[in-house]
Image (cartoon, coloured by chain):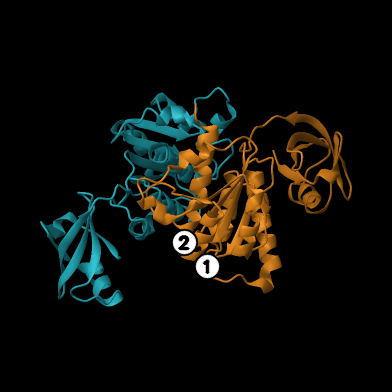
Chain colours: A orange, B cyan
Amino acid sequence: MQRYFIDPTSWNEDTVVISGNDAHHIKNVMRMSEGESVICVNVKAQVTAECCITNIKDDVTLTVLNYQNEAVELPVHVTIAQGLPKGEKLESIVQKSTELGVDRIVPFEADRSIVKWDYKKKKKKQDRLVKISKEAAEQSHRSYLPTISPVTSFSDVLAILDDYDHVLVAHEDTTRQIEAKRLSYYFSLFKPDDKIMCVIGPEGGISEGEIEALQEAKVKPIRLGRRILRTETAALYFLSALSYHLEEQE
Amino acid sequence: MQRYFIDPTSWNEDTVVISGNDAHHIKNVMRMSEGESVICVNVKAQVTAECCITNIKDDVTLTVLNYQNEAVELPVHVTIAQGLPKGEKLESIVQKSTELGVDRIVPFEADRSIVKWDYKKKKKKQDRLVKISKEAAEQSHRSYLPTISPVTSFSDVLAILDDYDHVLVAHEDTTRQIEAKRLSYYFSLFKPDDKIMCVIGPEGGISEGEIEALQEAKVKPIRLGRRILRTETAALYFLSALSYHLEEQE
């Protein structure tokens, strides 16, 4: 069944009024009629409901048939702070991280980011990332729509560390140290609803200066398995391993 | 240091003779001279050695300086049987699965594969997949070069199931059954050196007929977290979760 993320202001008890792009999609792309049903997700309340179309004019009005009790969200809130990678990798990271349950993505210009963010085109690029995330959230049946922050600086990442209960940084050199703590040690410290940030460098990794600044802020370096991962694979490993830890252990 | 996967026949005790493309790469791309060092990996013996160039003619002759004792491979052997996906997704799956430690990838034409494999171009496409895997293996410092099997049929996949100690299938419907066994139950059955296959459907998932045939062959359905994953994300989740289970738990 088609699924729409609906702004909380469009919900009024058991009635939902859809306007704009989503109304256009229902009327002109899906060509739906009164009496047909869709899934509406109230992203703020994390409520998912099967709704029946009761009226189609400019807006589409629906009535809730039943509320669904899907536990599809990770029990913790994960932010990926991603060093700006080359080409279209950021789009892929946004799409895949959304499928895997991310809460927020904060792209930042890292010391070793080769491509500098094109601030002239930033509005258009930002909109595109938000659209990719929304589509991925709908396709993977999420009840929460991730936040895609505008591209920022490393110092702005440092400035928000205090908002988090746990901050980790993927650090390639850590993979070589056998005595380093394993990832499960850090995962085992997470409690329900904790806010977690994982910092991931761009292609060349996190710089010496960046790792020093992070370690001064008590950020813990982690390894993601024994192999060297490309930057666009690191977030996917982190989120998959965390899902396994929290959702797939007996 | 530059890293080359060298055929076992090119090793003779502590001497390595590199010819063909890799010799060309050393001479004309890297422009290396006698006395410089590279990493040579004997893929069959899973031996990794730092080698010094002692002679450059048509071939490049090297002497082993020291053997490296890197534990970079998963302790089990994982085959991904991947339903043929659309577009360039197979290339991405081959690249990322190689980074994440896969042993073998068997692409197959599934009932719901939308794109049919172009058998006219198969040699060229197959060569390209092998090249992508080799480059990813070098970049992620693997000591084993994965096998990329030619695209095959579902019945050929069924025919090789007996070669494996454990066969699992990612099955979307399983994600809805709360009483289903968790992934960690199956992972906990794996012993070192076991051969494991994970079957993953194409965009539309595994068909009814395919899941029945697999279940008759005692293949176990698994879920990969609580969210619906795109086909190209499923293998990455499986390998990341397995790496976490085997390599990153205290």
Say which mark, if any, is on residue A113: 1
Q: Nearer the viewer, residue B175 or A1?
A: B175
**Where is residue A15 drawn, in percent x and y?**
86, 37
Say which mark, if any, is on residue B57: none
Q: Nearer the viewer, residue B107 or A44?
A: A44
Give the residue at x 70% y 41%: A2
Read off the residue under disc 2: A205
Q: Amino acid at mark 1?
A: Ser
**Where is residue B238 drawn, in percent x and y?**
45, 40
Q: Amino acid at mark 2?
A: Gly
Give the residue at x 80% y 30%: A65
Label 2 neighbourhood size at 10 Å, few (<14), some (14-19), many (20+)? many
Q: Is residue A12 above or below residue A114?
A: above
**Where is residue A34 drawn, in percent x and y?**
84, 38
Q: Nearer the viewer, residue B217 or B227?
A: B227
| Label 1: element kind | loop
Contact between marks 2 and 1 (CB within 8 A): the answer is no
Q: Residue furthest top?
A: B179
Label 1 neighbourhood size at 10 Å, few (<14), some (14-19), many (20+)? some
